[in-house]
């Protein structure tokens, strides 16, 4: 739970302003932004609730994408597994 320590300023005996320490103000603004993001996400999910869709695996199949995660990961790192050897070496 977010705790705030406002200082209330009055004008003519009536409460007019609430002043917060700057770090509390920043935390409050961050929480409000998070809430807004969550609200928009829930709204978007509700709109798409009955829209037909496909899963990632079906999409990859339809697009002809075949990924070999281990080989691709090694390739991105510049590594190659040699036949019969358990360790990898860097290719320069």
Image (cartoon, helix red, strand yellow):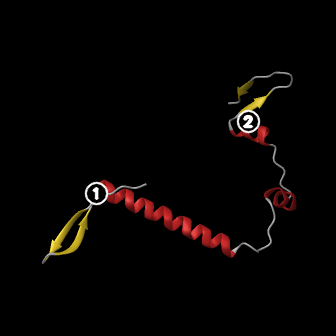
Q: Which residue is drawn at 82% across and 57% down?
A: 60
Please tell me whether mark 1 sits on a helix, a strand or a loop: loop
Q: Identify which residue is drawn at 33% across, 60% down.
A: 25
Judge by depth and name the residue closer to the eye, 87 or 36. 36
Q: Which of marks 1 and 2 is nearer the N terminus?
A: 1
Direction left: furthest residue: 12
Tag 1 near tag 2, CB within 8 Å: no
Quarter of the image with the C terminus is top right
- Residue 36 higher or lower than 70, as above or below: below
Q: Which of 80 and 13 is in front in this view?
A: 13
Residue 42 lies, with reference to residue 4, above or below; the image says below
Q: Which numbered marker is on residue 33?
A: none
Is residue 44 found left or right of 9 in the rendered image?
Answer: right
Q: What residue does disc 1 label?
A: 5
Q: Residue at x 71, y 73 (%)?
A: 48
Foreground mark, 1 or 2? 1
In the rendered image, residue 18, in percent from the top left (x then y), is placed at 25, 67
For disc 2, the marked residue is 74
- Quarter of the figure that contains the N terminus: bottom left
Measured along the vertical axis of the image, is residue 27 above or below residue 84? below
Q: Residue at x 18, y 68 (%)?
A: 9
Can you give x and y, in whole percent of width and height, for residue 6 in the image?
26, 61
């Amino acid at each position: 739970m977010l705790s705030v320590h406002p200082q209330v300023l009055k004008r003519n005996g009536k409460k007019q302003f609430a002043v917060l320490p700057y770090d509390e103000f920043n935390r409050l603004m961050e929480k409000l932004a998070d809430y807004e993001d969550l609200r928009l996400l829930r709204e978007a999910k509700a709109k798409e609730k009955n829209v037909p869709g496909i899963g990632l695996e079906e999409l990859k199949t339809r697009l002809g994408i075949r990924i070999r995660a281990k080989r691709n990961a090694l390739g991105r790192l510049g590594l190659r597994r040699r036949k019969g050897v358990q360790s990898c070496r860097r290719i320069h």
